Amino acid sequence: MIKKMTLGLAFFALMALSISSCSSDDDGGDSDCSSCSLAGETIEICDNGNGTYTVTAGGETETITAEDLEGVSPEDYIDLICTLGDLVP
């Protein structure tokens, strides 16, 4: 529980420190990924097909589980990150 909360806070802190210009896009191909651009960096979440997701941001990659998303779809998760990043001055 503490690890999940720490990971979430660290991820959102990273986003809060970024100045952002963001748009949500799906590449529409066979890949099951959603991404956006935040402060010139691509943030992407990909479904690994086994109940886990790979989140890539700022050159860092983290694997999270469906449980870590706490009921939010991967697309909504990445859109939330874009939206929060857009709110930071």
Image (cartoon, grey):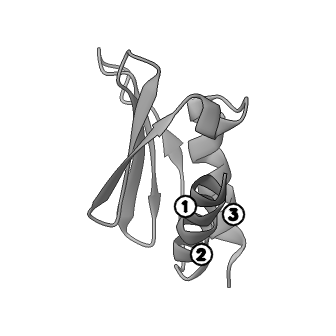
Question: Is residue 20 rendered to the left or right of residue 27?
Answer: right
- For numbered disc 3, what is the local secondary structure? helix
59 in relation to 43, above or below: below
Residue 27's x, y, as percent? 36, 29
Q: Are marks 1 and 2 in contact (CB under 8 Å)?
A: no
- Residue drawn at (53%, 44%) of the image: 24
Identify the secondary structure beneath mark 1: helix
Mark 1 vs mark 2, foreground winner is: 1
The picture quadrant where one finds residue 49 is: top left
Residue occupied by mark 2: 13
Contact check, label 3 and label 2, Cβ < 8 Å: no
Quadrant location of residue 63?
top left
Q: Residues within 10 Å of mark 1 (few under 14, many from 20)?
A: some
Task: Return the residue nearer the eye: 76 or 39.
Answer: 76
Of the numbered discs 1 and 2, the one sitting upstream in the chain is: 1
Return the x and y of residue 39 as percentages of the image width and height: 44, 73
Nearer to us: label 3 or label 2? 2
Q: Which residue is mark 1?
A: 7
- Identify the amino acid type marked 2: Ala
Image mark for residue 31: none
Sequence-wise, the earlier of marks 3 and 2 is 2
Q: Looking at the rendering, in which quadrant would you find the C terminus?
A: bottom right
Residue at image mark 3: 84
Give me the C-alpha separation between circle 1 and circle 2.
Answer: 10 Å
**Which residue lies at the image location 33% right of the left edge and 66% below the top edge?**
58
Q: Secondary structure at mark 2?
A: helix
| Residue 5 percent coordinates (x, y) | 66, 59
Quarter where residue 47 is shown? top left
| Residue type beneath disc 1 | Leu
